Structure formats: C-alpha cells, structure tokens
Amino acid sequence: MPLTRRDFAKRSAYTGAGVALAGSVGVLGTAPGALGSEAGDTGEEGAERFGGGREAGYGPLVADPDGILALPEGFSYRIITRSGVTELESGESTPSNHDGTATFEGPRGVTLLVNNHELKGPRSDWEYPVPLTEGLVYDPAASGGCTVVEVHRHGQVAEWVGIAGTSTNCAGGRTPWDTWLTCEENEDKAGEHGMTKDHGYVFEVDPHDRRANRDPKPIKALGRYAHEAVVVDTRRGHLYLTEDASGPNGLFYRWVPPQGFRHGRGRLRTLADDAGVLQAPKCYDSGGRFVDDLARATKTGTVYGVDWVDVPDRDAKTVPVRKQFDDGAVTRGRKLEGMWWADGGAYIVSSYAREESPGRHDGQVWFYDPRRRTLTLKVLLGVNKNPGEDGAFDGPDNITVSPYGGLIIAEDGEGIQHLFGATESGRTYPIARNDLNIGTEREQEFSEFTGVVFSPDGRTLFANIQDPGIMLAITGPWRRQA
C-alpha cells in the first residue's frame, strides 16, 4: 500500500513530536555542537565527555613513526595486504585501489574478507589490475574485481581472485546467506572506454566456495547504473541500493523480489533480467510537502515519509536510470555512498552536497525504517572550512555499525582523512588518521579510507587506505561507547 502525502501528514499530526525526533532506533544524530566543523569537539584536541566523566572514543591520536596510521594510545595495526608488495596465491601482485570490504567466519578460526578493487577503464591504465583468473572473468577488457583474503589465526595470510573483469568495484554489501554483492560504480557500455560488455551491474561473490564464482553473471534485475552499496532486508527480502552520480543527483533504490522467490547462495544470478520491481523513493515532509533532495534537511531528527516509484527501464538501454524521472517524481541525494543493515533498517550515507544540491553539508547519515516507511537524519556534518587541519570530519563514505555501539565511518573528504565514530548519544570521535602522504612535502595528499568492517568476533577492525591499496587490521582496548 503506497504511503501518500496525506497519510504521512496525518501520521505526523497524530504522533506529534515523536515523528520529529530521532525515533525508535538507536539515536545517532550528531549534536549541534559537533557538526564536524569545530576542532574542540573532535580529533586530537579533545573528546566529548559523558555524564560519568568518561570520554567518548579512545583519546587523542598518536602520530605513527612509520608514517602510515595514527591510532589512540594502546591500539596497534598490522598490514594484511599491500598492492605491489604482497602477492596472490598465483604469484601476481595484490591489486590496487582497495575499496568496499566484508568479513566472514571461515573454518578453523580463519577470517575471510572479500575486498573490492575500484579500478576503472582498460587494464593498461593500471599497474596492478585484478588478474584475469581463468573462469572468473566477466569482461577481459576491464581492470576491476574482488579478491578474497584469508587471515589465519596464527597470522598467515592468503589471497586469491573472487571475480575479475568488472569495472570500478566500489562498495557492495554482505548478504545474510554469507556471500558478497560487489557493485560496479560505472555506466560504460560495450564499445565505450575499451569495454567489450556493458557495465554498471551487481555481481555475487562467494568467499566460501571458489567454484560458485565461475562464469560470472551480472544480476541485471538490480539495474544498471553507478552502483555504490547494497543491503538486504533480512525480514522482507527487499534489497536497498545506493547510486553515486550527479547531473542530476543519484537515487536510493529498493528492489522487491518476485512473489515466491527465496533468497540463498547463488539464487540471485538465476533471476530473469526483469524479475521483481526496481523502485526509487519519493519523500514527503511532516506537512505532506514533496522533498526533491535529501540535502534539504538541515537538522538531525528530520523525518521524511517515503513512497516508492517504479523505474521505467532498469537496464538503462537509452537513458540512465536517474534521468528517467521528471522533476517532482523522485527524491535525489548527492553522493549516496555506503550502507549498513542494522536495527531493523538501513543506514545510508550521503557524502557531501555543494552547488549541485539545494543545500550544503559535509555529510549525512540517514536511517530508513521499512516498517514505518520513513527516512530519519541521524548524523549531519557541517561544512568543514579547514579540511587541511586535523580535528574535524567531512565526506563520510563506507560505514559499519560497531559491536561497541554507534557507527564507524570511513572518511573520503578533503585534506586529512580519518576513521571516526559516532556514538548513540550523538558525538563524533577519531579512531585513526591516515599519515601516509602520497603527495609532496609541500603539497601533501592523503588517500581516503575504505572498507571499514569488524571481524566476526568483534576484536579486529579492518579498513583500507585506497591509494596505493593497503588493507589494515586494527586491534586495541575496544570498549562500549555510552
């Protein structure tokens, strides 16, 4: 049953302030004094104290003498893979440009990680593309794909190709049936940029069964566009997907499976290309007014009602999906990035908004509640006026929900790059800083963090430095955040 403007306005009137606040899920709205723009609230200059006197987070970051990763006192890191240094089982180099990552519990204490490699365009453009392993190649002209990394209990590491010949594998999502959905942030068609097949699809990778990954097949039912991330509604079977695109801004999608379809390993690739229904959101505020872009929200706790509109041509044969809707038909968002399913819904990142949007910000995290059909703004980062100075955060990207409470977010902003947390009480705090300068001493440059995710036992936080491509395992005195 659609949620109409009138329905949402009536619901808002009945529930009053309850709809205008941060709702029934864990409160993650950043407090007004911690909008990521004041050094006194985040970073090395201090952390917000809880009522009992304990600080949010783990204290100030300590510079790394090796120039890679600054961490709080008592924490340490280990390099798991590094492009150009570590090797695959085949003897070829670990591919570069690490991105979205998920962890899985393997046999005999092994932690399995599926690691995207965001490599766009022809293979000749990259020194370390994903190797074209026989039987695992979709398009031999494309340079991206995924590797599977095995981290053994006693420290040994093995790495092998999960899929090759895909393009711009950015984020993705872990499934409840223990596989990885890797997403192409690309819209190239066969014949464009040297490609021999159409791109812009989602593929399934099984870290437990190498044979299941043979003869890769795109899941065309999920649409062809600049995919970013995907999550699975564990109760209803819907899939939610984000699009990182502009001109116009991208969309947040819902895929509704066909009646009688049952999820499981490898079942998505058996679907017909037009199976189920792919939809885009149409949002309304508490007064029943249409909201054209998520950047309109300027306060945490903002709640929008959501209706869903069918996508006309999900394979974008002539017109990109996001351009198939007239003004007023759907609600857009700038740089819709990482997602994570928890608390009965989807946490969704909008990385930043500038002149291409009706409002300006340096990051939003929304929560979509499928039961109430609402989007609630949980985290809002104000525009970072001094990105070259440590202390403020901007440009959230990959995201995970922490077993110790709140969110852990990978920063892909301007200037200095961090991993940072957002507590359930609404404060942000630093976890790590990228100290690896890939620029010059005079003009320093620091790559984004990607692939932030905890190990299945919650003891290790994995994250990547995208350029040159380093996977890190972070350990330390993790504790519950109040």
Image: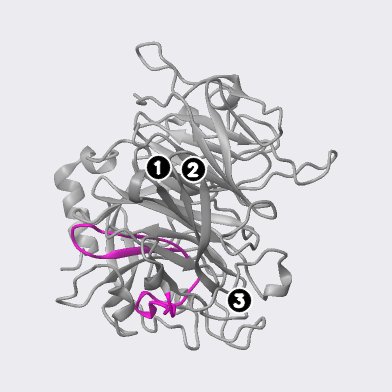
**Residue 181: % across, % down:** 40, 64
* Residue depicted at x 34% and y 38%: 457
User: Mark 1 = which residue?
Assistant: 455
Q: Are marks 2 and 3 in contact (CB under 8 Å)?
A: no
Question: Badge 3, how many Cα within 10 Å: few under 14, some, many 20+?
Answer: many
Please provide the residue range marked out in magenta: 214-242
Question: Badge 2, how many Cα within 10 Å: few under 14, some, many 20+?
Answer: many
Which image quarter holds the C terminus?
Answer: top left
Q: Are marks 1 and 2 in contact (CB under 8 Å)?
A: yes
Which image quarter holds the N terminus?
Answer: bottom left
Horizontal side of 398 relative to 84 (left or right) equals: left
The Cα–Cα distance between marks 1 and 2, rounded to whole angstroms, is 7 Å
Q: Which mark is residue 418?
A: none
Q: Earlier in the sequence, mark 3 or mark 1?
A: 3
User: Mark 3 = which residue?
Assistant: 142
Q: Secondary structure at mark 2?
A: strand
User: Mark 2 = which residue?
Assistant: 462
Q: Is residue 206 visible?
A: yes
**Residue 121: % across, % down:** 65, 74
* Residue depicted at x 40% and y 53%: 339
Magenta segment: does it hold 403? no
Question: Badge 1, how many Cα within 10 Å: few under 14, some, many 20+?
Answer: some
| Front one among 74 and 419 | 74
Q: Is residue 295 visible?
A: no
Q: Earlier in the sequence, mark 1 or mark 2?
A: 1
**Residue 229: % across, % down:** 43, 60
The amino acid type, in three-letter code, at marker 1 is Ser
* Residue depicted at x 61% and y 83%: 195
